[in-house]
Image (cartoon, rainbow, N blue to C red):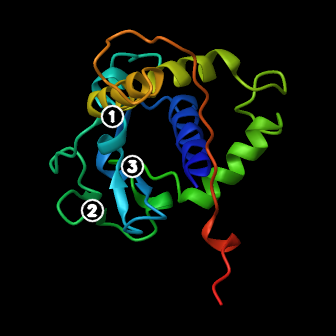
Protein backbone atom coordinates (compact mmCIF):
# COMPACT_ATOMS: atom_id res chain seq x y z
CA UNK A 1 0.00 0.00 0.00
CA UNK A 2 0.89 3.66 0.23
CA UNK A 3 2.86 3.23 3.48
CA UNK A 4 5.15 0.65 1.83
CA UNK A 5 5.65 2.96 -1.12
CA UNK A 6 6.50 5.88 1.18
CA UNK A 7 8.96 3.75 3.19
CA UNK A 8 10.60 2.83 -0.11
CA UNK A 9 10.80 6.50 -1.08
CA UNK A 10 12.27 7.40 2.31
CA UNK A 11 14.97 4.75 1.90
CA UNK A 12 15.71 6.00 -1.62
CA UNK A 13 16.23 9.51 -0.21
CA UNK A 14 18.43 8.23 2.63
CA UNK A 15 20.49 6.14 0.21
CA UNK A 16 20.83 9.09 -2.18
CA UNK A 17 22.11 11.31 0.62
CA UNK A 18 24.49 8.71 2.07
CA UNK A 19 25.99 8.10 -1.37
CA UNK A 20 26.43 11.89 -1.67
CA UNK A 21 24.15 12.31 -4.69
CA UNK A 22 22.20 15.55 -4.94
CA UNK A 23 19.34 14.69 -7.32
CA UNK A 24 16.65 12.08 -7.89
CA UNK A 25 15.23 11.67 -11.38
CA UNK A 26 11.55 12.59 -10.98
CA UNK A 27 10.16 10.46 -13.87
CA UNK A 28 11.47 7.34 -12.13
CA UNK A 29 9.26 8.01 -9.10
CA UNK A 30 5.72 6.70 -9.23
CA UNK A 31 3.12 5.22 -6.91
CA UNK A 32 0.86 2.33 -7.77
CA UNK A 33 -2.90 2.89 -7.75
CA UNK A 34 -4.13 -0.43 -6.31
CA UNK A 35 -7.85 0.33 -6.25
CA UNK A 36 -8.51 2.46 -9.30
CA UNK A 37 -6.60 1.80 -12.45
CA UNK A 38 -3.78 -0.41 -11.10
CA UNK A 39 -1.52 1.93 -13.07
CA UNK A 40 1.55 3.80 -11.88
CA UNK A 41 0.82 7.41 -10.91
CA UNK A 42 3.53 10.06 -11.31
CA UNK A 43 4.93 11.22 -7.98
CA UNK A 44 4.28 14.83 -9.02
CA UNK A 45 0.55 14.14 -9.39
CA UNK A 46 0.29 13.59 -5.62
CA UNK A 47 3.19 15.48 -4.03
CA UNK A 48 4.37 19.09 -4.21
CA UNK A 49 7.72 18.91 -6.00
CA UNK A 50 8.45 22.66 -5.75
CA UNK A 51 7.98 22.51 -1.97
CA UNK A 52 10.18 19.41 -1.76
CA UNK A 53 12.94 21.08 -3.76
CA UNK A 54 12.91 24.05 -1.39
CA UNK A 55 14.59 21.73 1.16
CA UNK A 56 17.72 21.38 -1.00
CA UNK A 57 20.57 20.81 0.00
CA UNK A 58 19.22 19.04 3.12
CA UNK A 59 17.32 16.74 0.72
CA UNK A 60 18.12 15.82 -2.88
CA UNK A 61 16.33 17.76 -5.61
CA UNK A 62 13.71 16.02 -7.73
CA UNK A 63 14.66 16.81 -11.33
CA UNK A 64 13.06 16.29 -14.73
CA UNK A 65 14.69 14.11 -17.34
CA UNK A 66 17.02 15.70 -19.87
CA UNK A 67 18.33 13.02 -22.19
CA UNK A 68 21.73 14.63 -22.72
CA UNK A 69 22.32 14.59 -18.94
CA UNK A 70 21.08 11.05 -18.36
CA UNK A 71 22.27 8.84 -21.24
CA UNK A 72 21.74 5.59 -19.30
CA UNK A 73 17.99 6.27 -18.95
CA UNK A 74 15.61 6.65 -21.90
CA UNK A 75 13.55 9.68 -20.90
CA UNK A 76 10.84 9.17 -23.52
CA UNK A 77 10.32 5.43 -23.04
CA UNK A 78 11.02 5.53 -19.28
CA UNK A 79 13.38 2.57 -19.29
CA UNK A 80 17.08 1.82 -18.91
CA UNK A 81 19.43 2.05 -21.90
CA UNK A 82 21.97 -0.26 -20.22
CA UNK A 83 21.91 -3.88 -19.13
CA UNK A 84 22.00 -4.52 -15.38
CA UNK A 85 21.61 -0.84 -14.44
CA UNK A 86 22.45 -1.31 -10.75
CA UNK A 87 25.99 -2.22 -11.81
CA UNK A 88 26.39 -0.36 -15.09
CA UNK A 89 24.39 2.87 -14.91
CA UNK A 90 26.15 6.03 -13.76
CA UNK A 91 24.05 8.78 -15.37
CA UNK A 92 21.74 8.35 -13.47
CA UNK A 93 22.72 5.77 -10.87
CA UNK A 94 20.27 2.95 -10.14
CA UNK A 95 19.42 1.86 -6.61
CA UNK A 96 17.10 -1.05 -7.24
CA UNK A 97 13.43 -1.84 -7.11
CA UNK A 98 10.90 -1.41 -4.32
CA UNK A 99 11.41 -4.79 -2.54
CA UNK A 100 15.16 -4.16 -2.20
CA UNK A 101 14.63 -0.65 -0.83
CA UNK A 102 11.94 -1.93 1.56
CA UNK A 103 14.39 -4.49 2.93
CA UNK A 104 16.98 -1.75 3.38
CA UNK A 105 14.36 0.41 5.13
CA UNK A 106 13.51 -2.35 7.62
CA UNK A 107 17.19 -2.86 8.37
CA UNK A 108 17.67 0.90 8.72
CA UNK A 109 14.70 1.29 11.07
CA UNK A 110 16.06 -1.51 13.24
CA UNK A 111 19.50 0.16 13.35
CA UNK A 112 21.13 -2.67 11.41
CA UNK A 113 22.74 -0.69 8.57
CA UNK A 114 25.58 1.74 8.16
CA UNK A 115 22.91 4.32 7.28
CA UNK A 116 21.76 4.30 10.90
CA UNK A 117 23.47 6.65 13.34
CA UNK A 118 24.88 4.85 16.39
CA UNK A 119 22.44 1.99 15.68
CA UNK A 120 19.55 4.48 15.70
CA UNK A 121 17.38 5.99 13.01
CA UNK A 122 18.30 9.46 11.76
CA UNK A 123 15.43 11.33 13.42
CA UNK A 124 16.60 14.75 12.24
CA UNK A 125 16.49 13.58 8.62
CA UNK A 126 13.11 11.92 9.15
CA UNK A 127 11.73 15.21 10.52
CA UNK A 128 12.92 17.07 7.42
CA UNK A 129 11.44 14.35 5.20
CA UNK A 130 8.09 14.64 6.95
CA UNK A 131 8.04 18.43 6.49
CA UNK A 132 9.16 18.27 2.86
CA UNK A 133 6.69 15.65 1.65
CA UNK A 134 3.30 17.31 1.31
CA UNK A 135 0.40 16.97 -1.13
CA UNK A 136 0.14 19.13 -4.24
CA UNK A 137 -1.64 22.51 -3.90
CA UNK A 138 -4.71 21.05 -5.66
CA UNK A 139 -4.98 18.17 -3.20
CA UNK A 140 -4.39 20.51 -0.22
CA UNK A 141 -7.19 22.78 -1.48
CA UNK A 142 -9.53 19.81 -1.85
CA UNK A 143 -8.70 18.67 1.70
CA UNK A 144 -9.27 22.19 3.05
CA UNK A 145 -12.68 22.37 1.36
CA UNK A 146 -13.70 18.98 2.72
CA UNK A 147 -12.52 19.90 6.21
CA UNK A 148 -14.62 23.08 6.07
CA UNK A 149 -17.67 21.09 4.96
CA UNK A 150 -17.17 18.58 7.77
CA UNK A 151 -16.70 21.27 10.40
CA UNK A 152 -19.75 23.18 9.18
CA UNK A 153 -22.11 20.18 9.05
CA UNK A 154 -21.96 19.86 5.28
CA UNK A 155 -22.17 23.57 4.46
CA UNK A 156 -19.17 25.28 2.90
CA UNK A 157 -20.39 28.83 3.54
CA UNK A 158 -18.13 29.59 6.51
CA UNK A 159 -14.37 29.97 6.16
CA UNK A 160 -13.68 29.06 9.82
CA UNK A 161 -13.50 25.67 11.46
CA UNK A 162 -16.34 25.68 13.98
CA UNK A 163 -16.11 22.26 15.62
CA UNK A 164 -13.56 19.46 15.95
CA UNK A 165 -13.85 16.40 13.78
CA UNK A 166 -12.35 12.95 13.62
CA UNK A 167 -11.28 11.03 10.53
CA UNK A 168 -11.33 7.25 10.26
CA UNK A 169 -9.20 5.61 7.60
CA UNK A 170 -10.89 2.25 7.23
CA UNK A 171 -9.47 0.10 4.50
CA UNK A 172 -9.70 -3.37 3.11
CA UNK A 173 -6.74 -4.67 1.16
CA UNK A 174 -7.44 -6.57 -2.08
CA UNK A 175 -6.10 -9.81 -0.58
CA UNK A 176 -8.56 -9.50 2.35
CA UNK A 177 -11.58 -9.58 0.05
CA UNK A 178 -13.40 -12.82 -0.71
CA UNK A 179 -15.77 -13.04 -3.64
CA UNK A 180 -18.12 -16.00 -3.86
Q: Which residue sits furthest bottom? A: 180
Identify the image quadrant of residue 117: top right
Quadrant the C terminus occupies = bottom right
Q: Secondary structure at mark 1?
A: helix
Q: Earlier in the sequence, mark 3 or mark 2?
A: 3
Closer to viewer: mark 1 or mark 2: 1
Q: Earlier in the sequence, mark 3 or mark 1?
A: 3
* Mark 1 residue crowding within 10 angstroms, few (<14) / some (14–19) / many (20+): some
From the image, tell me which residue sits under label 3. Answer: 29
* Mark 2 residue crowding within 10 angstroms, few (<14) / some (14–19) / many (20+): few
Residue sitting at x 49%, y 28%: 20
Left or right: 108 with respect to 167? right
From the image, tell me which residue sits under label 2. Answer: 78
Residue sitting at x 83%, y 21%: 118
From the image, tell me which residue sits under label 1. Answer: 139
Q: CA distance from mark 1 to mark 2?
A: 26 Å
Residue sitting at x 47%, y 21%: 151
* Vertical arrangement, residue 15 with respect to residue 180, above or below: above
Q: Position of residue 53 (x, y in %)?
A: 33, 23
Left or right: 121 with respect to 30? right
Closer to viewer: mark 3 or mark 1: 1
Q: Position of residue 133 (x, y in %)?
A: 46, 28
Q: CA distance from mark 3 to mark 1?
A: 18 Å
* Vertical arrangement, residue 92 with respect to residue 56, above or below: below
User: Is residue 159 or residue 63 the one in the foreground?
Assistant: 159
Amino acid sequence: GLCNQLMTFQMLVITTLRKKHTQILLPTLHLKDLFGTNEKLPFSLLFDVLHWNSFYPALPRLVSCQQELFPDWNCRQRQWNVDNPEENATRPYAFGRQPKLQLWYHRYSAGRTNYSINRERDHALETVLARALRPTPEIRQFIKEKMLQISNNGSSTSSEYVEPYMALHARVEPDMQDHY
